[in-house]
Amino acid sequence: MEEEKVRIAILGAGIFVKTQYIPRLAEISDIVEVGAIWSRSEVSARGAVELARRHFPGVECKWGDGGLDEIIQDKSLPAVAVVLAGQVQVDMSLGLLKAGKHVLQEKPASASYTEIEKALTSYHSICANSSSRPIWAVAENYRFEPVFVECKKLVADIGDIMSVQLIVEGSMNSSNPYFSSSWRRDFTGGFILDMGVHFIAGLRMLVGCELTSVSATTTHVDLTLPPPDTITSSFQLENGSSGVFVMVVSSRSPKIFWRVVGLKGTLQIERGNQDGKHGYLSTYDSADRTSSTFYPFCGVTEELKAFLKDVSSAGKKGNLHEPETRCSFIEGARDVAVLDAMLESAAKHGEPVNIKKL
Ligand SMILES: *[C@@H]1O[C@H](CO)[C@@H](O)[C@H](O)[C@H]1NC(C)=O
Ligand SMILES: *[C@@H]1O[C@H](CO)[C@@H](O)[C@H](O)[C@H]1NC(C)=O
């Protein structure tokens, strides 16, 4: 029997919708159908719809308050992807959840820790008052990237962790399409928060335990970028080990790596490319063996599949399927909580700050 396709609407028609959502959903069009694309403005909605129509001929173009209301009322659209400015995503998601839609919201999960607390209270009351328990997922592809899935298993073999390093020298300069994105210019935490959640997600997944406290310094050196554009933080892990997180938003020679040094070995994940594909190279080194494997990126597709599977199961009678925790709102919120604590510490001149437990 052929599975029925999940019909979704996409809210947002910006760069990420055009370059990731539409092509990645097109690759899995055997399980999904894009039923509508919405944007505040008609012009931008039309731009994205034109692209999507090649793969999803039935996609409708919606804009403004009226178009949004039509999507909310449309019972044939059980799920919505929210790919909007970081400042408005949580309110939009909550509105849709209240209307009974399942939501896949783009990262960052929220703009601040304060917003998380309010969001969770609202979400819990929505779930308590509805029989259907709408799913609130946050798109964080790093938890689905095979390099982290595989290295999470390997980390046990390096023994007690002595030190962790997460170094990010990014390449967010004027050649990058997100460089001039207007909402990012006006976002507290700047690119450190917007991009940083990916790296913190990778870190938390890799070490397999939570961070507890941080002490950080931020600066604003490259004035073409919104503040802050650098951060240097030390952090403590739940089980007593410690590490450093350094991030420079834009650098001449980009480099990104996580390195975990254990009593019995060392594990490193480094951004790179092989055979024309972007991805991450893992290297493992212990007394028994050394190995290195390159994993091309594919996390966005994997997370979309996981969400669609959850939506499809949620619609079935007697459903016992638990939604994938790697894309739960709470996981995304934990990444934000780490960066929020770092930014708070930096504002207090490096005073240690405990990360709020969620
Ligand atoms: C900390 O936890 C990680 C993950 O559970 C484990 O691999 C590591 O050995 C622990 N480190 C210490 C110092 O206990
Ligand atoms: C931006 O960074 C990339 C990657 O490092 C580099 O190739 C490019 O030349 C840079 N562009 C500008 C305008 O600095």
Image (cartoon, rainbow, N blue to C red):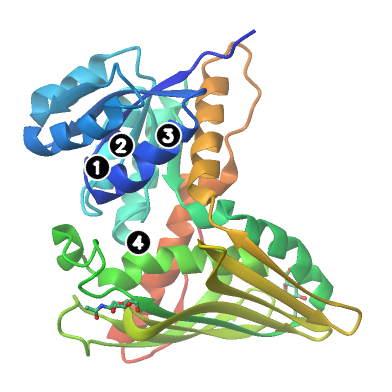
Does the numbered disc 1 mark a residue whose Cβ is under 8 Å from ligand 2? no
Disc number lying in front (3 or 1):
3
Give the left or right position of residue 66, taking residue 125 as reference. left
Percent position of residue 152, x then y? 70, 63
Pick whichever of labels 3 and 4 is earlier in the sequence: 3
- Distance, label 2 to label 3, CA atoms, is 24 Å
Q: Quadrant of the N terminus?
A: top right
Answer yes or no: do the residues labelled 2 and 3 have beta carbons within 8 Å?
Answer: no
Identify the residue shown where x is 44% and y is 29%.
Answer: 127
Identify residue for label 1: 91
Identify the residue shown where x is 84% and y is 82%.
Answer: 286
Identify residue for label 3: 25
Disc number lying in front (1 or 4):
1
Circle 4 crowding by C-alpha within 10 Å: few under 14, some 14–19, many from 20: some
- Distance, label 1 to label 2, CA atoms, is 5 Å
Tell me the quarter of the picture where residue 275 sits. Answer: bottom right
Percent position of residue 68, x then y? 17, 26
Q: Which mark is residue 192?
A: none
- Distance, label 4 to label 2, CA atoms, is 16 Å
- Distance, label 3 to label 1, CA atoms, is 25 Å
Identify the residue shown where x is 39% and y is 39%.
Answer: 23
Pick whichever of labels 1 and 4 is earlier in the sequence: 1
Answer yes or no: do the residues labelled 1 and 2 have beta carbons within 8 Å?
Answer: yes
